[in-house]
Every structure is written in C-alpha cells, then in structure tokens.
Amino acid sequence: MKVSDILGLNARTQLFSYPYNKPSAKKVANSKLATKRAMKKAGIPVPEIYVKFVNPQKVMKFDWSSLPDAFAVKPNKGYGGEGIIVVKKRSKDKTGWITTSRKKITPDDLKLHCLDILEGAHSKRNVPDVAYIEEYVDRHKALKRYTFRGTPDVRVIVFNKVPVMAMLRLPTKESNGKANLHQGAIAVGVDITTGITTHAYWHGEYIYNKPGTKRKLHGIKIPFWNKILKIAVQCQIATNLGYLGVDVGLHPKRGPMIWELNYMPGLSIQIANVAGLKRRLERVAGLKVKDEDHGVRIAKALFVSDFTDRVKAEEGIRVIKGIEQVKVYAKDKKSKKVLARIDTGALRSSIDRNLAEELDLLGQDNILWERKYAYRSAGGKQSRPVIGLSFRLAGRKIKTSANVANRSKMSTLLLVGRQDMTGFLVDPEDNG
C-alpha cells in the first residue's frame, strides 16, 4: 500500500465528505430514524421498529411486557455503537431479558436507559435525542462461527455510485457482541469482485484466526454479495449522499438490510484491505455511472484485491511467454481462441474493436465508461470504450476491464496488461 494512496482524516473531510454531501443529505445520515424512512421509501430493507420514544411520558407509560423475546434499544443519533443494548432472550424467571453480553436487564433498567438517551447521554455533543426499539437480527449461518454472540455487518464505502471498498466487522468478546471496531471488533477486508475476505486486523496487527480458535478469517465467502453491493449503491441514490459508508446486516431469512449510513466513515477499512481509499476514489471520480448495476460492474472491474499469496498457495506461480494463446469469452459464454501479447509495460488490457464486436461485447450493458485519448495525426481526441472482459490465460480465468482499440495492424488482437498478471511470471526472452 503506497502512502500516496492512503486517505487521511483531513483529505476525507475536505475532498470528499463535505464537497460531495449536501447538508440535507447529511441530516438524513445523522438520524437513524430518518435513514430508515428514506430506505423504506426507496424499497430498501431495514429492521422493523417496534416503538419510538420522544418524551419521558411515553417511556413511563409503555407496556414493556409487550416486547418480544429479542430486540435492540438504540439512540437515534448515537455514534460508534454507544448506547445500544441488544437483547437476545427472556430471562428464565420471565422478569426481564438477557443481553448479548449475558447480563440480565429489567423493564426498570430499560426505562432508565431510554430516559438517558432522551437526555442526550449517547448523542453527539450530548443534545436531547430520541430512543427507539427495533427487531433483533440474529447472525446469518454463514458467519455465525466467526463471531462472538453479536451480529456482524459489512461496511461498504460508496462514491459516485461505485462501491470502492468493503470490510466485514466481526463482534468479539471484548466488543460485547457489537460490530464496532473501536470497541474491539475485528476488521476483515473483503475483495470487491468476489466477496471473499482477504486480511483480518485486530488490536494493531494482522491476525489469521478468530481469537481463541483455529477458524481462518481469510477466504470467507460472504453470502448475497452482489445484492450487498447493489443495496449499498441504492442507499446513495436514495439519500443523495455523494460519499458515504453503508452498514449492511444479513438477516438469516430475509438477507441484506441496512443498519445505518455514515457520511464520514472511519478509515480503518484501508488497513483491513491493505489498500488506500484515496487512489480508489480518484479512479471513479467523474465517471458517468448510470445506476447500481453499472456501478457494481465498474467496481468489480477496477478493484480486484491482491490475492497473490493465496494464488501461490493454491495454484502456484505460472510462467507465461511474451505471446500466449488465450480464450476470450463472448457475451453468450461462447469463446474464441486468439493470440495475446503479454505486456508488463501496459497497465490495462486492450482488445481489438472488431474482435469485441464479433463477441458482442460492445453493448451498452457491457461498456463501463469511455476514455478520451489524444492523437497527433488526428489533431483532436477520440473516445475509447472500456468494457468488461473475461478470458482464460494459462488455465486461469480472468475477469477484468479492457480498452477497446483498433489492433488490426498489430501482431495480436489482445494485449494483456500487468493488472491482469497477478500470480504469473513472464519470461521476457520467450516470445512464443
């Protein structure tokens, strides 16, 4: 990770959080209840709210026995997980409930806690707040074995309708079952393309296993990955926040649903992914992104994590020549074998326009964006589309983005750039 790629606190605020987020949009993100209203209006799933307390009288008059066995009490404008009580079941004597930290809590305890919330004990700058109780969302079976009691979530950073980085936040014993990093949860980087976890970071160092166990934290396949990315972009569209962090929970039966939004999300996600946010944000700034599907396609083409270590372990390093025969896949999954030049001097791969047309790869649904290039002979600029491309090189299938160009006078119809050479070694003296 290059220092120049890292997004710092000042840059986050001055270059992204404030310029791209209007006051009205930030007001929605600052209120969990306003966020839920905006999500419901847009048809985006959120946990059900059982009751809302706006004054002490309602707290005192409420029939606490009407609550279900499991629920969560939250402050509307709390931050960092402060003031949240998660109840998992009723106590055996039926006089109260048991929290995720295995403490008994009574109706009187809940009353006092809600009154504290109303007085602003858990809000920013201690201003008066609103308390509410919502449904408890249990752990999804795919992630249950990696967490301690509480429910994990996925944070996705979205900018310009493109999900640029994501991490899985795993509750621990130290965090009392909460998925908040500053309280002791584990940050696990996630590859945007596959939804597979890559690196885990906890207490200032990278770890490989869940604390106290031999369960590996890398290589976890997060369910509903495409839906998680799409729903994160939909949140941006629904709130008009240009730059935000979206916290997505996984309901065991209903799938992804939104916890909350943050227009100034923390920066630890960079450490978990061993990648800088600044570089990724700059790569998508100014792109014309049509909708969530388009944004997700762009993200998957641009932000493949470095799986070099895992590729070495699982598949071994493969040596390739300067010219290789590759199988290029058409839109209908058929393929064509062509020669490709392996060029370590080029960053992005490039495909001949006629070949792309033949394989039906130039449809609007496959064009990620357009780039303009200047030509001395033409005296102006020409647009080249950048498309989604899949090809098989040396037995390995690669999904990437590629420039479309006229390569009819070139020796090969495909050029493979260095961004698609992870796990390969190129023999510079072997040109096929």
Image (spheres, rainbow, N blue to C red):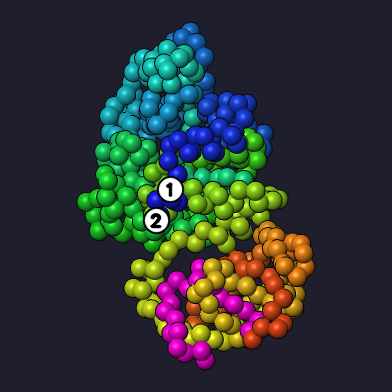
The amino acid at mark 1 is Ile
Of residues 153 and 94, which is closer to you in this image? 153
Q: Is residue 145 above or below residue 388?
A: above
Residue hosting label 2: 1
Residue shown at 37% from the left, 35% from the top: 88
> Residue at 59% across / 34% down in the picture?
19
Is residue 71 placed above or below 131 in the rendered structure? below
- Image location (x, y in percent) of residue 51: 52, 22
Relative to 224, is 307 on the left or the right? left
The residue segment tinted magenta is 412-432
- The residue tagged 1 is 6
Q: Nearer the viewer, residue 375 or 92?
A: 375
Give the x, y percent position of residue 220.
40, 59
Q: Magenta stretch containing residue 428, yes or no? A: yes
Under circle 1, the secondary element is: loop
Label 2 element class? loop
What amino acid is labelled 2 in the image?
A: Met
> Distance of mark 1 from mark 2, alpha carbons?
8 Å
Q: How many marks?
A: 2
Q: Is residue 302 visible?
A: yes
